[in-house]
Amino acid sequence: MTNLNYFLIRRVHSLTGVIPLGVFLIGHLTTNSMAAFGQEAFSHKVELIHSLGPLLPFVEAAMIFIPLAIHILLGIFIAFTGKSNATDLGYGRNWAYTLQRWTGWAALAFIVYHTMELRFLDEPGARALTGSVLNGKVLTAGDVFFMHLAEEFQSVLYVLVYLLGGFAVIYHFANGLCTFCMTWGITVGARSQKTMSWIALATGLLLFGMLVAAIVGFRSAYDSAEYEAMRALLGGLPH
Amino acid sequence: MADKKVHLIVKRQEGPDSAPYWEEFEVPHTPGMNVISALMETRLNPVTRDGKRVRPVTWDSGCLEEVCGACSMLINGRPRQSCSALVDNLEQPIRLEPFSKFPVLRDLMVDRSPMFEALKRIKAWVPVDGTYAMGPAEKIDPAQQQEMYKYSECMTCGCCLEACPQYNDSSAFVGASAIGQAYLFNMNPTGKTLKDDRLDEMMGPGGVVDCGNAQNCVRVCPKGIPLTDAIAAIGGQVTLHAVKRLLRQ
């Protein structure tokens, strides 16, 4: 491999983490935090995404799955070139380095689970139910998903998985913003790097707040009678 | 005062291929002594704490004033020079180990030549050798002299590499010291004629792109060199360099 190719591969890993994956993460959490404002607000956002129609799979592939696969594969390679020593040299950034690798693995596990469950197992079901009538209301895919998630988040384990998995993803992104700026030579001095770490912390806290808002929104909106009616009427979701 | 003792725990190894083992020594304390003078006591009387007569401890040292880097070792787990490590400032027992990232030659003495190889790889020099006089060099702005001076203090001691999680057997990373030197020589008016060669190396496996931003290098550097500034600056230089390479190839 030429030096230039190696450079490009390393920088592609760095870039994909922010664009498009980081941008997607912000959008994804923004959409889901709408759950805090109720089913209508959430479904409206989902409909907005689904309005892409037949283009959606291509947008998903280009914006999420392909960059994600590249980021994961290169990330695994990078993880194996490092030997963490934060327990010997417990400096702040050394722990940040170590956590970046741990949260990388945790985020990988969480994203595989999360995507398999909601995108590949539940989504076809939700789409199949779209247009059905429940209590005189025509359901959208967003409505079905909302009710489904409201039920899922009743489980404390499910909430914990999402809090921990979400933390891993958000930490990995926020710390990645700091290292992105160092890697590309944007923040060169120690002071600008410190400032960037505060900005990243604020970004991370905001995103985590959105995650919590989404979970609280889903959890508190659960209406067992409505969900049972949906399950009885439509047989519920496939899994 | 007279019977005050210094307790040393030394990681020892006969040769490059033998297994390491630990030995403990108790040596008389003298005011103001450093780790090297404590080690010299074990040479005067190479008897372990439990009374066994052993081979004297081997270590490397040169200047004894923290400018050559030869006496670097792990002192209570921290990479630093044993000449400037004063016994009175250390917690006892004092644990001495050779650097783990370099081949051990004997006891506390390691082979630091990989660092020299890294300097050769990034052409850390000013190309002035020739068959005729090249005349006076270009003048350097005082502000830039100040910036360069910090990096010229590097003594290739290896502390930054010992502390670096990315510098290990499974990585080709050249480490912070070589990146700092690439930055220094890229600033030199004559040295910058080799800038493209240096940045080519910095793009490849083991170059600046392998940095993981753990920033231990700058924390442990005994000379306080702003190594992470150099890493980010070289990262920026390499980005522009890659664009140039892409568009001109």
Image (spheres, coloured by chain):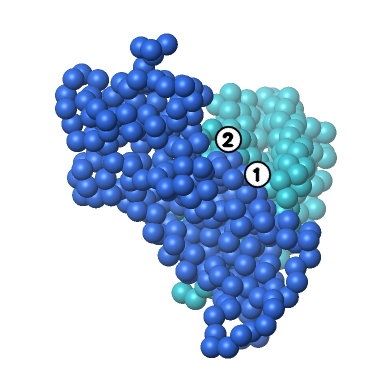
Question: Which mark sits nearer the N-terminus, 1 or 2?
Answer: 2
Vertical relation: A181 (above or below) A90: below
Asked if residue A87 can be seen in this view, the reply is no
The amino acid at mark 1 is Asn
Q: Name the residue under label 2.
A: A91
Left or right of residue A65: residue B247: right
Residue A4 point in image, percent of width and height: 56, 74
Comparing labels 1 and 2, the label whose residue is closer to the camera: 2
**Which numbered dot is residue A160?**
none
Question: In the rendered view, does B200 fall on the left or right side of A45?
Answer: left
In this rendered view, identify the residue nearer to me: A170 or A34: A170
Residue B138 or residue A154, whichever sits in front: B138
Drawn side of residue A105 relative to residue A236, left or right: left
Report the disc number at residue A175: 1
Please say if A85 is above or below A212. Answer: below
Callout 1–callout 2 Cβ contact below 8 Å = no
Chain letter, colour cyan in render: A
